[in-house]
Amino acid sequence: MRGFLYCTKCTRMLTGSASRGRGKYYYYYHCTSACGCRYKAEDVNAAILKRTEKVHSKTRNGRSMYKIGK
């Protein structure tokens, strides 16, 4: 999703990174400026998936349809 997400504080583009701690990696999206905005990639990706599933629906004949709006 890097390149499609923007900071809620300063509206700059977010970039992705990984931090290692306690024997595993943690992934984040963070702002390219010094505003300090950082989001867990797992949370962001889940929110995007939830929104995508909400927008996407199937018709009776099985073809994919996309709703505009809610």
Image (spheres, grey):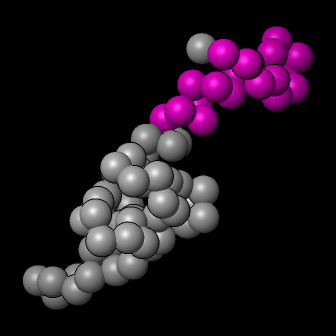
At a point 11% along the width and 83% down the height, the residue shown is: 22
Q: Where residue 27 sits in the image (x, y, percent)?
A: 34, 72
Q: Where residue 37 sits in the image (x, y, percent)?
A: 29, 60
User: Is the C terminus in the top left, top right, bottom left or bottom right quadrant?
Assistant: top right
In the image, 63: left or right of 67? right
Instruction: Locate residue 16: give its quadrant.
Output: bottom left
Q: Where residue 15 sits in the image (x, y, percent)?
A: 47, 71
Let me know if residue 42 appears in the view. Answer: no
Does the magenta portion include 56?
Answer: yes
Instruction: Locate residue 26: give its quadrant.
Output: bottom left
Q: Is residue 64 above or below residue 26?
A: above
Q: Nearer the viewer, residue 3 or 52?
A: 3
At a point 48% along the width and 60% down the height, the residue shown is: 12
Q: Nearer the viewer, residue 62 or 36?
A: 36
- Magenta segment range? 50-69
At a point 64% along the width and 25% down the height, the residue shown is: 55
Let me know if residue 23 appears in the view. Answer: yes
User: Is the N terminus in the top left, top right, bottom left or bottom right quadrant?
Assistant: bottom right
Instruction: Locate residue 69: give its quadrant.
Output: top right
